[in-house]
Image (cartoon, grey):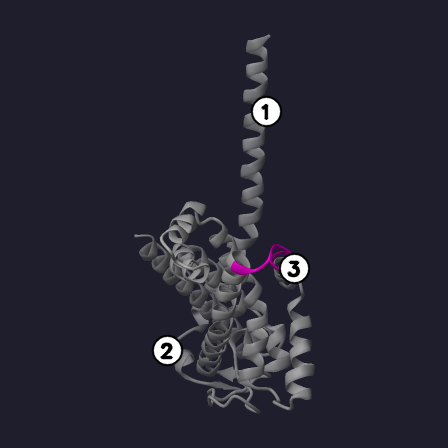
Amino acid sequence: MAAKGHRVRIARDRIITVLMILATALCLVPLVDILWIVILRGGHAISLKTLITPTVGVAGGLSNAIAGTLILVFAALVLAAPLGIFGALFVSELAPRRLASFIRNSAETLTGVPSIVLGYFGYVTMVVWFGWGFSLLAAAITLMMMMLPYILRSADLAMQKVPEELRRASLALGATPTATAMRIVLRASVPGILTGIILATGIAMGETAPLIYTAGFSNYMPTGQLFHSPVGYLTYVVWTFINEPFASAHALAYAAALVLILLVLCFNLLGRFVVRKSLR
């Protein structure tokens, strides 16, 4: 009986292993197919001229969209990272239990809000009500609202994993709870915080809906003005130009998709390098 039960467990283990491999393959097939098409068609369309020339109608290059994407994401990150990190520090170390639970639930809820809803909110409040028009600041704040819950929750989870002994040792040596949070917990949570920032930045780079309502689009290089100055970005080129009945527009859309993938890849590699450095 024992031998028979052992054989049953081995067979069950093999069946589950095969099912997991098949499920992984089914997930990878569409991903590889998308990457192959983008790399193949985008590689033929991209050139140095494409990278340094601004968009002209449905042709030209991508310099304005690349610059706009980097500026928008950087501005949103500058706004979201401090709020998310210090918000997580407050939730993890200083907030009362009920308030901390409320903030965590709110952050979880915000991650599930469709991006187009945030874009419409940004349009109604900042573009129309505040009178900023399509602008860099309106788009950056909208992206910040998307990035903030990811950074806050990742940082919060990283801080919860810090051993309690470190906190008690710091308090026993005479440090205040605030000093313990800033000097002990925050430093120990750096890898998890950076992981959340990488995730949030990758999500922000791939968004279109919030920016259509807040940044508009411009064929010109970003001016740096915060108000009444539309900004170009790569996802608009991908989303809009692929639907145009022109070969030049399709080529530019695939080139923009390839550049966007490379930017996200580079940022992820840079983030992983920084995480490894922080762990040493």
The local crowd at label 3, few if under 14, some if 14 to 19, many if 20 or more residues have their Cα within 10 Å, is few
Q: Does the magenta stretch include residue 34?
A: no
Q: Distance between the residues labelled 2 and 1?
A: 55 Å
Observer-side mark, 1 or 3, equals 3
**Which secondary structure type mostly characterizes the magenta part of the structure?**
helix
Residue reaching furthest to the top: 1
Q: Name the residue under label 2.
A: 48
- Vertical position of residue 114 compared to residue 278: above or below: below
Measuring from the top left, give residue 160's x and y in whole percent: 50, 51
Q: How far apart are marks 1 and 3 (CA)?
A: 43 Å
As drawn, the label of residue 12 is 1
Disc nearer the start of the sequence (2/3): 2
Q: What residue type is labelled 2?
A: Leu
In the image, which residues are magenta? 94-101
Tag 2–tag 1 contact (CB < 8 Å):
no
Measuring from the top left, give residue 31's x and y in whole percent: 53, 54
Q: Mark 3 points at which residue?
A: 102
